[in-house]
Amino acid sequence: MAARLLPWYADNGRHHLPWRHTVDAYALWLAEIMLQQTRVETALDYYPRFLEKFPGWESLASANLDDVLALWSGLGYYARARNAHRTAKLVAADWNGLFPDTLEEAMLLPGVGRSTAAAVLDSAYGQSQAILDANARRVLLRVHGLQGNPRAPAQEKTLWRLAEQETPDPAHEYNQAIQDLGSLVCLSKRPRCTNCPLMGVCRGSPAVTGEASPQVSGGSGKRPRPKRFGLFLLALDGSGKVFLERRPEQGVWGGLWCLPLVYEETSLPGPEDLAEGAALAASRFGAVLRAGEILSFRQHVFSHFILEFATLPAFLPAMQQVPDALSHGQLWAPGDALGLGLPSPIRRILEELC
Ligand code: SF4
């Protein structure tokens, strides 16, 4: 594979990516974390802004988590931001500001799996390490014609063995090449086999199998996502401030500021659910729903489900004292709230208020 991939990479690789031009372990680790569940095009927008605000372990370690989440806002999978913050604190405090230089030690850091650790050690410290990110995994599955669940432990073991077997020493260029091939050519849905340098050796390619497309999907055979329906309380006080509460650390949108969720089910809310939502809003928040508002649902796609959500506009009367239910919440001027860590659908709602 290396003999075919390296010349292809020299001519076709994504040499412009900013993390390809640094050997700084912090910058490389940050890119790896961002790219774990985010498309390159999206990460390219966030990466320089994050590096500018938090240029190294120390600055990220000493940052307020709210500021980190605010900058991560819109990237999704917020556990990554919380883990990144914890990792920076550990590296700054326990590792003298240096990313650990062995796989075993690097993998002790929150959110750092074997492939992430290997990629940083390879790029920052010149260690020849095999990687197995989603792109490398898909290419290896197809080239070696592997069938079955790619996440099953036995298959995982086989994939790591093949990754080590195929990875040359030095590994750096090859690691970039296999990622780029997966990203540009060996696409999960419509692989461009006729443009692929591995066409002659790939056991999954149509030339070998006689099928119209590679036999091994590499994990693209996703089941349709289930739908959930949610109602957020959009409670404004007399001065136009909006009530937001912080989500629990664990779970969806963990640690982010959000409108209170007063309904979340697998079915559309009916009139009785709206009445229940109104009663909940009144008892927990002292909010009075504005009558006659038409609910218009929007969609937010998560990796495991689709959330169809609407807002329940409500008026929040001046309060003599803050009820217990509000102790983890706060009123914010919508413009100020935009500086917080917010889920992207909530950000869009607040932007409309500004
Ligand atoms: S020949 Fe097709 S299936 Fe095989 S690695 Fe190339 S693009 Fe992927």
Image (cartoon, rainbow, N blue to C red):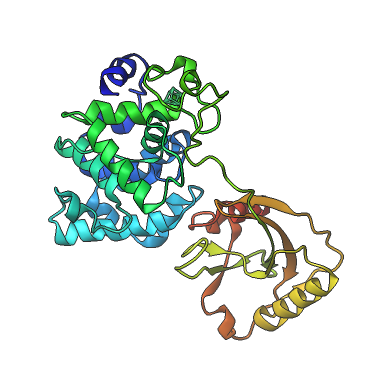
Q: Is 80 drawn above or below residue 245 in the view shown?
A: above
Rendered location of residue 88, percent (x, y): 26, 56
Rendered location of residue 347, percent (x, y): 58, 53
Q: Residue at x 52, y 68 (%)?
A: 247
Q: Is residue 12 left or right of residue 208?
A: left
| Viewer-nearest residue: 3 or 31 | 3
- Look at the image and tell me in which quarter the N terminus lies: top left
Q: Is residue 36 visible?
A: yes
| Viewer-nearest residue: 8 or 15 | 8
Q: Is residue 8 left or right of residue 101?
A: right
Q: Is residue 51 visible?
A: no
The residue furthest right is: 292
Q: Is 217 drawn above or below residue 4 in the view shown?
A: below
Q: Is residue 159 left or right of residue 342?
A: left
Q: Residue at x 45, y 56 (%)?
A: 78
Q: Residue at x 39, y 26 (%)?
A: 181
Q: Is residue 236 left or right of residue 58?
A: right
| Viewer-nearest residue: 264 or 312 | 264
Rendered location of residue 275, percent (x, y): 81, 75
Q: Is 117 drawn above or below residue 185 in the view shown?
A: below
Q: Residue at x 22, y 30 (%)?
A: 172
Q: Is 127 drawn above or below residue 16 in the view shown?
A: below
Q: Quadrant of ligand 1?
A: top left
Query: Which of the 4 image quadrants contains residue 81?
Result: bottom left
Rendered location of residue 55, percent (x, y): 27, 45
